[in-house]
Amino acid sequence: MSSRLIGLRALETVGFRTPRITFEKPEFEYVAKPCYIWHGDPELNGEGEFYQERIHTEPIDYKYYAINDGTRVQTAAKRVTSKLHGPKRFLNQIRPRPTLTRRLRRLVTRLNLRGVGIDLVKDDEDRFWAVDVNLAAGYRDSGLEPALYKSIRECLPDR
């Protein structure tokens, strides 16, 4: 899942809408991305290893998080400013949409994940598009910090 392409395919498999991808610079507006999350950040109309169609939206990202704490999968969501348009800033926590959280839980269950973060954008028709997935998500301001602690603790041996 550190491969963005594999992550996007996994998101499609559980029902998320994802933008089209090309390996040649497209004629339409795009977000250039490296294949692996540790190789850098996405760039609007820049150079990348692949190109994802840009969904026209406000410069807002919807961050959805899931934590499997060993007992259940907890979810949360927040809005942040898009780092494609400047530094990312926390705006507010939001009530997660049930359809999106069902898909997110399906992803966690199918892949036996302990935690995951998904970046979504909302188009002018109120449709959500999954644009990235991150197994090493930053859970700050998510409200899931206690669940993250419990999940980590469940994986550690008792000593």
Image: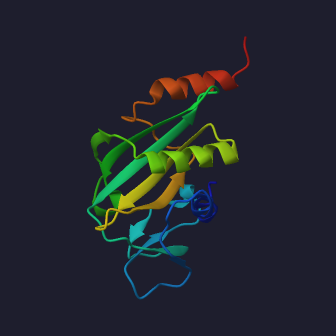
Q: Position of residue 134 (x, y in %)?
A: 54, 50
Identity of the residue drawn at 62% across and 37% down:
114
- Please identify the quadrant where the N terminus is shown: bottom right
- Residue found at the far top of this picture: 159
Give the residue furthest to the front.
Answer: 98
Residue at horizontal 28%, vertical 46%? 89
Q: Quarter of the image containing the C terminus?
A: top right
Q: Is residue 110 above or below residue 148?
A: below
Q: Quadrant of residue 78?
A: top left
Colour scheme shown: rainbow
Provide residue 9's location: percent of width, then percent of height: 61, 64
Count of numbered tags: 0
Q: Residue at x 48, y 45 (%)?
A: 101
Relative to residue 39, is residue 69 depicted above or below? above
User: Looking at the image, which is closer to me, 16 or 30?
Assistant: 16
Of residue 125 and residue 65, the one placed in the foreground of this image is 125
Whether 48 is drawn above or below 116: the answer is below
In the image, farthest residue toward the bottom: 27
For residue 59, side relative to residue 127 (left or right): left
**Which residue is rendered at x = 46% and y = 76% of the image?**
47
Residue 49, percent across and down?
Answer: 55, 73
| Image location of residue 91, percent across then percent down | 26, 44
Q: Is residue 18 left or right of residue 30?
A: right
